[in-house]
Amino acid sequence: MMVDQETCTQCGVCGRECPLGVIAVGEKDFPVFGNGCVRCGLCVSVCPVQAISRPAPGALRGKAMVCDHCPVGCDVPEGFLGACQRYRNTDGAIIPARPLVMPPQIDPEALCHNALMNRPLITAIGAGGTYPDYKPAPLAAQTRVQDVDVVTVVTESPLTYSSMLLKIDTDRAIGEETAAVTYRGAAVGHVTTEQYGSKMISLGGINVMKSRHRLKATRLIVALANNEPAELSVEGGAKLQVQVGRPPIINGRESEDMKIACGAAIMGMFGPQLYTLADEIIILDSDITGLFSESHVGHVFGFDWRGIKPRGKYGSPGRYFGYPGDGWGGSDVTDPAEAFEIVEPEKIRPGLKILVLEVTGKHAALLEADEKKRFHRLALPEDVAAIRDLIAENKEPSMTSAVYMGGCGGSARSGVTGNPIQLNRAVHGGDVRLSIGGVSAFVLPGGGINFMVDVGPMRWRPFSWTPAPAVVAPIEYTMAKETYIRLGGHQQNLTLLEDIQKTWLVRKWDD
């Protein structure tokens, strides 16, 4: 790495952030890079005054090898680890530095036993509740399944400590992270961290449930969980119409697409089909735009940098963080000629071609430079149209889904055990399986019985609410009968599944 001593302020940030700790920054010293420096470029990206630069690719030292296991491309000296600590240069070869770890052996009998507990005998939908919590669960069903006595204890329980994570699969922007989300004029949540192209909205939670908007938040969560549509507004962002299992409507227009990968990953996935089409290739994306010539896949196919930079902030070689908008790939680029800027004009020759694509294959443009280094759009060749269509074939449909999150407090405890902590331990230990509305829940690690569950597969409008306000969730605990007895469950509370089907008004799941 090279340091511009006139620019460097000797702040020491580069040394503190270096993953290998090979940068020495003394009280009066400029950064000094040790023998173990692998030129990962992290110090370049964190330097507040841009005083550090990375040598040109290929400027290797001695027996250093380029690691191609991630976009960074560390130059690893012999005997040293890369920045990630996963690979080492050993005798001129980049090899894994850690032993391969094998999982525990599977016990077939335990696997079969656990599979029997994965689905409740009955759901809690329509079972009734246990309020106040000292009352026994309304139903504890028992039957024999493949030589195992199985018990499911159910209750419909009011949960104030609950929320919903709304997942919106779309390439279109909805608003800034942390922006407030309103429903019928009430603040009921906020935009949270985006996950691989999906926009996330958090609704409810205890602080919202204690606010003056708690009733609207409760009714919204129940409506969405019961597959009803709702209209939301993001502060400073979009107006949304959402319904679980359907595409979102964003600012009055139904969203169609979700990318299968970011721009840089699309570039790698389809590199063999792309590299013959132009002198430079840009895959536009609101998250990570790809630049072919800088990437590892570009190097494999012998690409040289053409003196242009795509719109976005540099992240690592071939990867630029895009800006969200209503343009190509959910970015703010609406004209392919504005997808890049010329950094080194001397590299632009007449006839140089730049292919601009976007992550869902909706758009493609081939641009050619003239004698004045201006780019003009060409008619789209058949081979370019074919790769555009291939990328489009690999996009996913835009969709709305929702995960309900809650915490089981006193619910059904008296129907299972008189000592609630035993039930907590049994759930976390896997002896008791938790499901909500007939769908298996994921129990979060740590204390309590905090769970997450996909509401999409649920049937029969499983959720309701009380004016407390609280969301009423159908909760099921399924276990072997011996576990039920061990936890303190009373056999007199058990009812044979066959008898329940005779005496209760029963609907089948798929009716």
Image: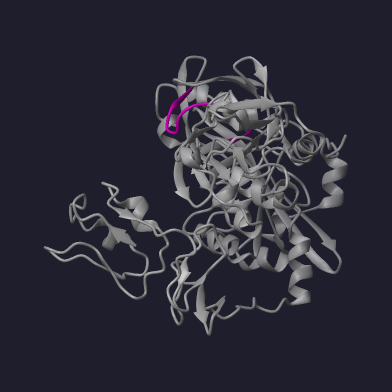
Tell me the quarter of the picture where residue 254 sits. top right
Q: Position of residue 203 (x, y in %)?
A: 51, 32
Q: Residue furthest bottom?
A: 91
Is residue 398 among what the camera can see?
no
35 relative to 498 in the view: left or right: left
Q: Position of residue 238 (x, y in %)?
A: 53, 20
Magenta segment: 165-181
Q: Residue furthest left?
A: 28
Depth check, front residue: 204 or 47 = 47
Visual colour scheme: one colour
3 relative to 434 in the view: left or right: left
Depth check, front residue: 432 or 279 = 279
304 relative to 114 in the view: left or right: left
Is residue 362 among what the camera can see?
yes
468 relative to 130 in the view: left or right: left
- Residue 14 versus residue 137 in the image, above or below: below
Tell me the quarter of the picture where residue 20 sits. bottom left
Depth check, front residue: 106 or 480 = 106
Q: Position of residue 102 (x, y in %)?
A: 64, 78
Q: How many marks?
A: 0
- Residue 375 versus residue 436 in the image, above or below: above
381 inside magenta stretch:
no
- Residue 169 versus residue 376 in the image, above or below: below
* Residue at image coords 47%, 40%: 346
Could you tell me which quadrant the N terminus lies in? bottom left
Q: Position of residue 224 (x, y in %)?
A: 64, 28
Could you tell me which quadrant the C terminus lies in? top right
175 inside magenta stretch:
yes
* Residue at image coords 43%, 36%: 206
